[in-house]
Amino acid sequence: MTEQELQQVMIRYRPLGLEKGAEFLLNTADMLRLVDDLQQVGAVFLGGTSWKYIKPGDNDWIMEDIEHEFDVDESVLGQSDSSAITAEQVKSAILNLPDTVDFVTIYMDVPVSWDYFGDGK
């Protein structure tokens, strides 16, 4: 996957998500679609974190839900099919999150210097 391919996928999802610091959050349904689209361009996933509203019904306050973080099996990283394998692991983890989770962030194996949206933010 190239930085440009990443940006082409991510920019389509930006209007659907929230940006909290360096984190990009999507609801679980949108995140599952994003994982599929990123896997199509060869993204390799490392894991993710869930987020929830602090007070349900009060959409101004969210926090990281560290009880429901997830990681992929590191032994598959570097394999020729690691994109497909890690995508399936991430999707499985997302599908098994409790109903209390409002958003999900994913982490990918990309250079830290890459700009996900192509706008320097």
Image: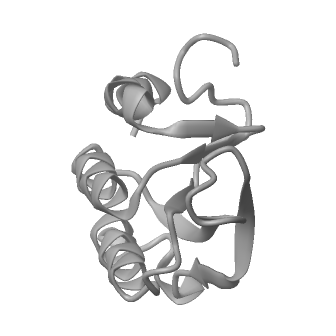
| Residue located 40% across and 52% down the image | 43
| Nearest the eye: 35 or 96 | 96
Give how far across and how far down residue 38 sits, in percent. Answer: 32, 48
- Dividing the picture into quadrants, the one containing residue 94 is bottom left
Give how far across and how far down residue 91 sits, in percent. Answer: 33, 74
| Nearest the eye: 72 or 93 | 93
| Nearest the eye: 6 or 67 | 67
Visual colour scheme: one colour
Q: Is residue 30 above or below residue 95?
A: above
Q: In the rendered view of the protein, which quadrant contains the C terminus?
A: top right
| Residue located 50% across and 64% down the image | 102
Q: Is residue 104 visible?
A: yes
Q: Is residue 25 above or below residue 73?
A: above
Q: Is residue 10 visible?
A: no
| Residue located 56% across and 71% down the image | 47
Q: In the rendered view of the protein, which quadrant contains the N terminus?
A: top left
Give how far across and how far down residue 72 sits, in percent. Answer: 52, 81
Q: Is 63 on the left or on the right of 59, as rendered?
A: right
Which residue is farthest front?
57
